[in-house]
């Protein structure tokens, strides 16, 4: 009877091997391929300048500089990774902090270019696709 109990129970070596192989299979994404998150984009665009036009199309284009203290919201619409480069189309909404000026809101699509350097995604370029401003409109 003792032989039957020993034969039916799993060997001590089988359980740890199964547990460690399950642990090794859990990651679903390679760490070096990490995606650029909306939060990273919000930080990366600080200090960057984009030429923008009025939403109505009137007037000359002007420059918008993303400032650290302003509200920013980023939504990733499309992502294309090709080796060490990544191109993203994002929808960004931002607005000025009107302490002594009129409220300016800017929103629309931007195309961002990233390059992986030393294991980190670095923002290398911004192209305006439909990023436009409006004055005096708070939403």
Image (tube, helix red, strand yellow):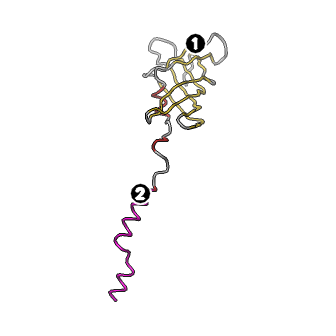
Helix, strand or loop under label 1: strand
Give me the residue at 45% from left, 11% from top. Answer: 100
Q: Cα distance, mark 1 to mark 2?
A: 53 Å
Report crowding for label 2: few under 14, some 14 to 19, many 20 or more residues within 10 A (C-alpha).
few
As rendered, which of 94 and 87 lies closer to the eye? 87
Q: Nearer the viewer, mark 1 or mark 2?
A: 2
Helix, strand or loop under label 2: helix
Report crowding for label 1: few under 14, some 14 to 19, many 20 or more residues within 10 A (C-alpha).
few
From the image, tell me which residue sits under label 1: 62
**Residues in magenta, as a range:** 1-24
Q: If you read the primary sequence from the N terminus, does the residue marked by circle 1 or circle 2 appear first?
A: 2
As rendered, which of 5 and 71 lies closer to the eye? 5
As rendered, which of 42 and 137 lies closer to the eye? 42
* Identity of the residue furthest to the bottom in this view: 1
Is residue 4 a member of the stretch shown in magenta?
yes
Residue 125, horizontal then vertical, whole percent: 54, 24
Give me the residue at 62% from left, 16% from top. Answer: 53
On screen, residue 37 above or below 14: above
Quarter of the C terminus within the rendering = top right
Q: Give the prevailing secondary structure in the magenta stretch.
A: helix
Determine which of the numbered discs, if any, sits on residue 23 in the image.
2
Residue 124, horizontal then vertical, whole percent: 52, 25
């Amino acid at each position: 009877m003792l032989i039957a109990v020993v034969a039916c129970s799993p060997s001590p070596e089988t359980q740890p091997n199964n547990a460690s192989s399950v642990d090794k299979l859990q990651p679903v994404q390679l760490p070096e391929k990490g995606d650029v998150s909306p939060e990273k984009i919000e930080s990366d665009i600080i200090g960057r300048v984009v030429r923008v036009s009025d939403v109505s199309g009137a007037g000359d284009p002007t420059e918008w500089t993303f400032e650290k203290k302003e509200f920013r919201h980023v939504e990733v619409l499309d992502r294309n990774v090709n080796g060490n480069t990544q191109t993203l189309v994002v929808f960004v909404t931002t607005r000025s902090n009107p302490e002594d000026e009129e409220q300016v809101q800017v929103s629309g699509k931007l195309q961002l270019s990233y390059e992986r350097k030393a294991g980190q995604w670095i923002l290398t370029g911004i192209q305006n696709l439909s990023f436009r401003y409006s004055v005096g409109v708070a939403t």
